[in-house]
Structure formats: C-alpha cells, structure tokens
Image (tube, helix red, strand yellow):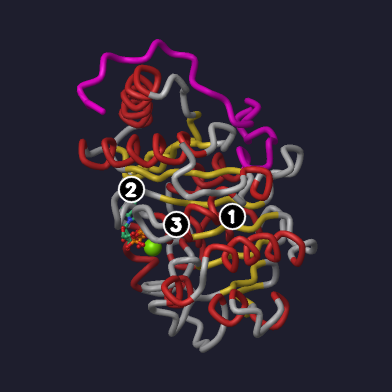
Amino acid sequence: MNRLQLNKKDFTPQKSQKKLISIISGKGGVGKSVIVFNLADTLSRMGKKVLIVDADVNFGNQHVLANINVDYGFKQFAKSELSLKEAIVKVSDNVDMLASTNSIGLFEEIDIATIANCINRIRTESTEYDFVLIDHSSGVNKHSSVMAYGSDIVITVLVPELTSISDSYGLFKYLHDINSNLECRFLVNRATTSDEAEYIYSKLCAVAERFVESIPRYFGYLKENDDFRKSVASQKTLFNSVPASTSFSELNVLAHKLLGTKTPFGQINSFERINKTAATADIKE
Ligand SMILES: Nc1ncnc2c1ncn2[C@@H]1O[C@H](COP(=O)(O)OP(=O)(O)OP(=O)(O)O)[C@@H](O)[C@H]1O
Ligand SMILES: [Mg+2]
C-alpha cells in the first residue's frame, strides 16, 4: 500500500545516474551528519565536486560541523525564495552546502508537493556537482521519505545495537513497502571490527529476507574511533583535525563505492551485496 499516496513515477530516479544520496537512520545519533560531512570531504579530495544538503530542518548541524555562520539555506530554497546557487554556501574548494538554519517547523509549513518539487529542483539545479549528499533527521516523516524516494540511493546508517538494527529493519520495510525499487544500502557505523559489521548486516538480511522478501545491500562500515569526536569538537573535517586518523582508509573505501571505482587495495567497490547465507535472526517483525 502506498501510505504516502505518492505517485511512484514522480520519484523514480534515473538509474544510470547515482548522484543524489540520502543518508537516513531509524535511531538518532548514529553518525549520519558526521559521515555526510566527512564523505563529502573525502570525495572532494578525489577531485569530485560535492553538495551537502542538510535536510534535518529542525536540528540541522552541518554548518556547525563546518564552522560556518549562515542564516539562509534549505528553508529559503524549499520555499522557492532562493535558487540553489543563491542558497548555498561554500565550505571548501570542492564542497558547497545547503545549510539548515532557523528552519524549525519547516516541514509543518510546507506540503508534500512542495518538498517533492524541492528534491526535483535539487536534481535539476545541481548539474555542476558530481554528488549531492543529503543529511536527514532520524526516524520517519513524510517529507524525509519523499526526499529519500527522490534520491538515487538511500544509505541507512546503523550501529551495532539491537535497537538500532531493529529500527533500521523497520525503516527499510517502511520504505520498501512504498517503493520496492528504491536502492537501499546499509552502513554499519561504530563497529568494533569489519566482521562485526558484516555480522550485523547479515542479521538484517535474515529478517528482511523473511518478512520483506528482499535483501538490502551492504554499503560498508566505519569502526568506532574517537577521532570523530575530536573532529566534531574542533569543527573541522577528520582530515583537517586528525591527519593521521585510521578512519581515512574506511572513508576512502566508502567513497570508492559511491564512485564505483577500485580501492587502493584492488577490489572493485560498486554496490556489492555480501554473498553470505543470512544468519538466523533474533529480530521479529
Ligand atoms: N565511527 C565513530 N566512532 C566514534 N564516534 C562516532 C563515530 N561516528 C559518529 N560518532 C560520534 O557520534 C556523534 C553523533 O553523530 P551525528 O551527529 O553525526 O549523528 P546523527 O545520526 O547525525 O544524529 P541525529 O540523528 O541527531 O541527526 C558525533 O558527534 C561523533 O562524536
Ligand atoms: Mg544529524
């Protein structure tokens, strides 16, 4: 059932062009904003031009992470008061930002058609960018869902906790029930090891296979690393705050996955699904 009464045709992305990436989560505080901020930086250092869209209208903090003082952005763009070019602010040579400031309650002000128009305008007005990374609020709301459906790929971030796994499955099911063509990927953040991340993913697959009859794909992982906290505190990217951070190689792998190119280690990193037998899961629908 189409719970949002969406016309799927309006939001079906062009499959060849994987440029608009929505980063979402069920549970809050799992690392979406920090990942968007640092993935944009990583891609930019690979020569790509990136736009960060802060779609967390109530508690957007991309401008805080970047230490930028700005009083316009997503709100004015969504209301068509400013064009994308007018609404963005420069973060670095290859990174621009559509910030969310002073926009608490915006989604109560604007209707679904306006937000659908907003994501379509982001696509048409972002031709100069290689990637548009959209940072969402946690959980489900109609406006975020519409933006997610208008994206080419939706990456759900989760952490290795039962509640986060359970919420992520719920979110996947919700989105999949409305549009089964949506390209969903899972990113396990704050993992202890790569094996733990893959185990968490396999648990999700087991539930998804059983109840949704569809298996989401794996996007990758980032290990727990206090360097992220340090970089947030210094309002700089990880690269600029902790230049020797061990998380760079993981961020590079994620960036290569978006690019569909080879990592320095040689393997092709497109959006592969880990080909494992789904583990017996202990999460119920
Ligand atoms: N891999 C990691 N290792 C250690 N700490 C991390 C990691 N990723 C994120 N964090 C910490 O988690 C905090 C919360 O991250 P962030 O604000 O990006 O989460 P969020 O999902 O955007 O939250 P919200 O749902 O409130 O928007 C960060 O300030 C950072 O210190
Ligand atoms: Mg956030």
Please state, as top left, top right, bottom left or bottom right, where the C terminus lies in the image.
Answer: top left
Q: Residues within 10 Å of mark 2 (few under 14, many from 20)?
A: many
Q: Give the CA separation, mark 3 to mark 2.
A: 14 Å
Residue appearing at x 69%, y 75% in the figure? 84
**Quarter-of-image position of residue 160:** top left
| Element at label 3 | helix
Q: Return the x and y of residue 195 as percentages of the image width and height.
A: 35, 25
Mark 3 — residue?
Answer: 142
The magenta region covers 256-285
Mark 1 — residue?
Answer: 42
The one nearer the camera, 188 or 152, is 152
The one nearer the camera, 107 or 256, is 107
Q: Are marks 1 and 3 in contact (CB under 8 Å)?
A: no
**Quarter-of-image position of residue 85:** bottom right
Residue type indicated by callout 3: Lys
Residue type indicated by callout 1: Thr
For residue 237, say whether it is visible.
yes
Mark 2 — residue?
Answer: 26
Q: Return the x and y of residue 26 as percentages of the image width and height.
A: 33, 48
Position of residue 8 in the picture relative to residue 162 (left or right):
right
The one nearer the camera, 218 or 58, is 58
Q: Return the x and y of residue 134 as percentages of the image width and height.
A: 54, 59
Residue appearing at x 33%, y 38% in the figure? 170
Q: Residue furthest top?
A: 277
Q: Give above or below for 11 relative to 72.
A: above
